[in-house]
Amino acid sequence: MKAELQGIKAEAEDELRRIGSPDELETLRVKYLGRKGILSELLAKIPSLPAEQRPEMGRLLNELKKDITSRYEGAKTALLDMQRPKAVGPVQDVTLPGRRPPLGHKHPLIQTIEDIKDIFADMGFQVAFGPEVELEFYNFEALNIPLDHPSRDDFDTFYLKDDVLLRSQTSTVQIRIMEKQRPPIRIIAPGKVFRPDTVDATHSFMFHQIEGLMVEEGVTFGHLKGVLALFAQAYFGPDTRMRFRPSFFPFTEPSAEVEISCSLCKGKGCSTCGSGWMEILGAGMVDPNVFKAVGYDAEKYTGFAFGMGVERIAMLKYGIDDIRLFFENDMRFLSQF
Ligand code: PHE
């Protein structure tokens, strides 16, 4: 009977290897494991065996049953696997909506520069640029600031070499443009400037300015006031008032500091402006010495120039109280614009 069991085992294994469909598998199950299957029949024969053979035969039969059952289960999973449709590559649901990449926008300083540029463009001003790394001549001498003049301190900067420096004002672009072009000239020049200032809420070693220059025959202080008044009202709102206070710049004469009524409190006085007035820029009539430096006839031409700090303008417009916010790349700040 032992030999018979081994024969059954080999036969069952062979048949299981050849299974090709669920029907065949089921037939096989009934044949070996079914209630009237081969194994049940053998089990039924045990009581008729001699008593000393019975336990051993029982054990062998049980082992065979376990073996065939586990092979049967294995063949069943293999069949199921074969029937499942196979995906090619990673499974993708093409009906899912796409992942939108976050959309950036212009930095508030660039937006401010563009807003200001648009206003002056409407008045016929063109945009001009000059280098950030400058010769001493353009930052100082040509702007009527001789080496030993105390006002040089106001425009102190970082030196790279003896006469090469980082410009501390965009007024350098006035000279560069006038050297190349003859009047009439109407330009604004935005860009970075550098000063050895300790960083705090209102100071930075780098900030942005926008320079303005208009030169032609017959330009007066009245034109300066008119142009700046139009700008202030266009940028800060139609009820903005403006006032000029006498000041000094080596490259303009006379010179003025220009203030507007506070756009936040409408001139009543608040924590941003204090007095109700906010200084927005420096300006004046181009000094004849500047015309001399670029070879213009100071008897024939007159002109005005102005310069404003972009960060300051943006801070006043939006009520921002710390200049460092512009440079920290904090999305919580930047995404508000
Ligand atoms: N360059 C001056 C500054 O940096 C501003 C200015 C420009 C003043 C043009 C008068 C005319 O403060």
Image (spheres, rainbow, N blue to C red):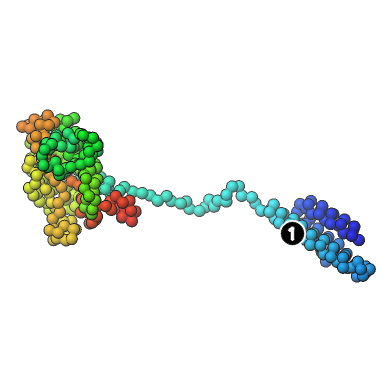
- For label 1, the residue is 73
Residue labelled 1 has its Cβ within 8 Å of some atom of ligand 1: no
Which quarter of the rendering shows the N terminus?
Answer: bottom right
Asked whether, in this view, residue 105 is left or right of residue 169, the answer is: right
Q: Position of residue 111 (x, y in %)?
A: 27, 47
Give the answer, above or below, for where 10 lies relative to 33: above
Asked whether, in this view, residue 241 is left or right of residue 108, the answer is: left
Q: Position of residue 3 (x, y in %)?
A: 90, 57
Instruction: Tell me the kind of residue under disc 1.
Output: Glu
Q: Nearer the viewer, residue 54 or 7?
A: 54
User: What residue is at 20 percent from the left and 41 percent from the top?
Assistant: 157
Q: How many marks?
A: 1
Within-10-Å neighbours for mark 1: few <14, some 14–19, many 20+: few
**Badge 1 element:** helix
Q: Position of residue 88 (x, y in %)?
A: 60, 47
Give the answer, above or below, for where 240 lies relative to 50: above
